């Protein structure tokens, strides 16, 4: 079985990346969602190992020291991180592990794991992004302005991603994203072992002549 | 309309790359085969502009001086080359232009055109390659040995390609190749204009605040 790929998905707020991720997980067999680890207490309804892995502060710090996180951060005095072991287990089992994460975290992961596939989800235009944000009617104008200002900052790093996923029609977007991920399995950087085997086989043959 | 991509396909003799290329051209609308230019005389049945563009030696040399070739070479005292203008016209018309070419030529093109997508077609194993070559029964053992020795040399450059296309089942191989090429359109290196537009739109918005 071919090893899965670590997929890092970012995108503008309102681009629909959460929906794309959920549909990939639900509609295809070969995806797994990364489960974060946190030191905060479980809220009602949250399940350990599903919503989060809940651990003590001591346990979390021990894991940081043992370099067991892909990335981690502190919010409101609690630790949040992506456990490496869970991600690796899933990848070994052939699953593409999806990590939905903001731009700074994504670029940190790319630095440590150049094999990760970085996808940036965007609407076809900023006018459409604005229309979507306003039509939700759940957020104040102030909050929408903050989201757009945040998008401006994020857009400066878009070119550092591997692929730009345009979410125009959702069905097509999900299909395209799956195809991009499928294609990535054939990239030479992810076929190192196969290439080595072919080279060895050919070398044995020509040496045998 | 999105611009097409320049696709360079190489692969071991017997890997079936010619068949894959023909099926892409016949089964999908968005491919065009690059037509070479040559100074040799047309053979019976060859059509100018289809088989080759047939030109005089003077014309060919003038085009070399005007840098109008993607790559060119001399065989048996005749010039053969890939005219840049034809490739660019097709790409502007949205066609992915396929160039079936050996490894050295492919790597030369990648150097001058980093946007080109380099695909390497290989059977799943060298044993299968041998079986295929022998089962053709049209070539002597000597010729087959030469092809395998040639494959050994080519295999040293496989890792410089963008994708490794394993031709196990032909139908799947054609489908995968098409998906890889489709996915390549969304890569950030091929979305530079779109990214710039999004950045500009967001900048205008935040400056307007």
Image: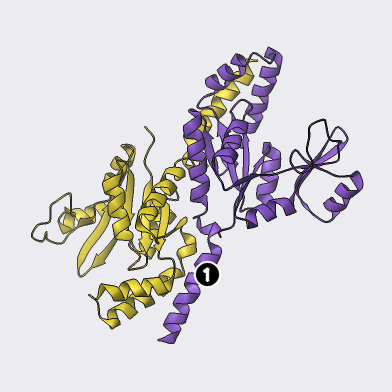
Chain colours: A purple, B yellow
- Report the residue that reaches farthest toward the right: A58
Q: What residue would you read off at disc 1?
A: A196
Horizontal and vertical percent for residue A16? 59, 29
The quadrant of the rendering that contains the N terminus of chain B is top left
Residue B70 visible in the picture: no
Q: Locate residue A94 relative to residue B144 in the image: left or right.
A: right
Residue A83 visible in the picture: yes
Q: Locate residue A148 relative to residue B16 in the image: left or right.
A: right
Horizontal and vertical percent for residue B78? 19, 65
The quadrant of the rendering that contains the C terminus of chain B is top right
Horizontal and vertical percent for residue B127? 41, 74
Q: Chain of mark 1?
A: A
Disc 1 packing (10 Å; few <14; some 14–19; many ≥20): some
Horizontal and vertical percent for residue A152? 63, 27
Q: Is residue B48 above or below residue A148?
A: below
Q: Locate residue B178 relative to residue B188 in the image: left or right.
A: left
SS for dot 1: helix
């Amino acid at each position: 079985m071919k090893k899965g790929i670590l997929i890092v998905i970012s995108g503008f707020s309102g681009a629909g990346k959460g929906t794309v991720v959920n549909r990939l997980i639900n509609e295809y067999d070969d995806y797994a969602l990364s489960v974060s680890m946190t030191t905060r207490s479980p809220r009602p309804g949250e399940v350990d190992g599903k919503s989060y892995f809940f651990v003590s502060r001591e346990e979390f710090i021990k894991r940081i020291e043992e370099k067991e996180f892909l990335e981690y951060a502190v919010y409101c005095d609690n630790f949040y991180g992506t456990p490496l072991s869970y991600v690796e287990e899933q990848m070994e089992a052939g699953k593409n592990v999806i990590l939905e994460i903001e731009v700074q975290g994504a670029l940190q992961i790319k630095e440590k794991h150049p094999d990760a596939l970085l996808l940036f989800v965007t609407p076809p235009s900023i006018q459409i992004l604005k229309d979507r944000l306003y039509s939700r009617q759940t957020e104040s104008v102030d909050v929408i302005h903050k989201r757009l200002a945040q998008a401006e900052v994020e857009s400066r790093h878009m070119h550092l991603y591997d692929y730009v996923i345009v979410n125009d029609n959702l069905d097509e977007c999900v299909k395209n994203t799956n195809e991009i991920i499928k294609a990535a399995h054939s990239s030479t950087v992810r076929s190192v072992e196969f290439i080595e085997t072919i080279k060895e086989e050919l070398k044995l043959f020509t040496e045998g002549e």
